Image (cartoon, helix red, strand yellow):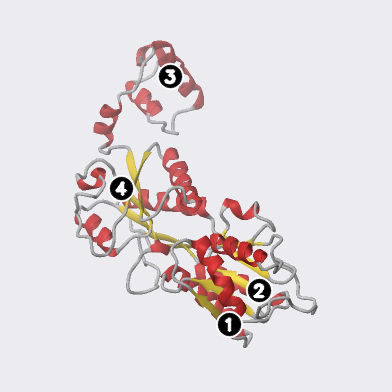
Amino acid sequence: MARQAGVSVATVSRVLNQNESVRAGIRDRVLAVIASSGFRPNANARRLVSGGSGQVCFLLANRDLGDSFHSRILKGVEDYSRRQHHQVVYTRFDYDAEMVLPSDDLPRILREGGGVEGVVLAGANYPSMIRYLEGLSLPYVLFGNNIVNDTAAYPKENAVAFDEERGAREATEFLIELGHKRIAFVGDLSIQWYRRRFQGYKRAMQLRKLNALAIDLHERDAVELGRRAVPDLVRRYPGTTAVLAQDDETACGLVESLRRLQIRVPDDISVIGYDDIREARYVAPTLTTVRVPKERVGEMLAETLFERIAGRRSPALMLSTELVIRESCVRLTGAKLKLAVK
């Protein structure tokens, strides 16, 4: 094949491995010879040469890929890994802080080891998983927002996160600029990532010397949490003109339940979500929300993982969010408010 193309065997190898040092004309000539010969590179042989499996694992823990949030992170991981000529192996795993690892329930690709060069830990993970991977000396990178431990602090290395507190603070400041002073936060404050969002909201309220109003409910179904929050909101905080929800699904539940009480969004009360899932732009009214750069998070997770595979240190990265203004918020006009005890 090298003789047919008029190049060295090393040049053919560089073309097969998509090395960018090969000039375009030579690459085209080699590829034409490969195509005409019907040659197919042997993946096992290439792995022996490179010393790696050519695969990384995306482990989604305690979450469902039907969640559009994590599916976008996975896409970012896949896009970056593809550019590095690696395949992403996807697997799920449900576990809790009490499970001893390794466990028979652990996905086989991690339980047996050696099948992948590194792991992206997405979903919600506990320190036990990190200790297990470190024991295997297997490079990993963590989605830093959803590590479940005794503190709400973000990891300092081997992690990529987005700034939840700042996003919530900016959303609250936007509502204040619209003239709202009685603004409530709705969420499950037992979960540390939602607690961080509450802290951002609370900080913005304190800076303007406004009272922080919290509806704290423990409910795994976020839409149902939003539905359940409305009776408490009406009873405990009459006169509320705006709500910041812990996430978009909670905001959707709020809007639905408010509508049943004939409380109009945004005419009677403004609502802001968090995450900017795809559904946020299709509800009525379309949802103002804090956009998380989910695919960018995935790309940076993959980039950080490949740095670790190469043996380089990986300080944690923090990405910014963006406020996306749609139809669910309005400027307060002083008209009589409809939200009151009923």
Where disc 3 sits, the SS reads helix
Which is more foreground, mark 1 or mark 2?
A: 1
Which one is earlier in the sequence, the residue at label 1 or at label 4?
Answer: 4
- Name the residue tied to disc 4: 118
- Locate residue 239, reporting x and y percent: 68, 81
**Between residues 113 and 245, which one lies in front from this camera angle?**
245
What residue appears at the point 60 percent right and 66 percent down from the top-left corner? Answer: 254
Work out how far the residue at label 1 is from the one at label 4, CA to CA, in angstroms.
Answer: 49 Å
User: Label 1 near label 3: C-beta < 8 Å?
Assistant: no
Of labels 4 and 2, earlier in sequence is 4
Q: Residue 236 carries which label?
A: 1
Q: Residue shown at 41%/73% (left/top)?
A: 190
Label 3 neighbour load within 10 Å: few <14, some 14-19, many 20+: many
For marks 3 and 4 on the same chain, the one whose residue lies earlier in the sequence: 3
Q: In this view, does 2 lie above or below 284?
A: above
Left or right: 165 in relation to 284: left
Relative to residue 44, is residue 7 depicted above or below? Answer: above
User: Does residue 318 appear in the picture of this structure?
Assistant: yes
Q: Could you say whether the residue bearing mark 2 is in a helix, strand or loop? A: strand
Left or right: residue 25 versus residue 42 is: right
Labelled disc at residue 30: 3
Under mark 3, the amino acid is Val
Q: Could you say whether the residue bearing mark 4 is in a helix, strand or loop?
A: loop
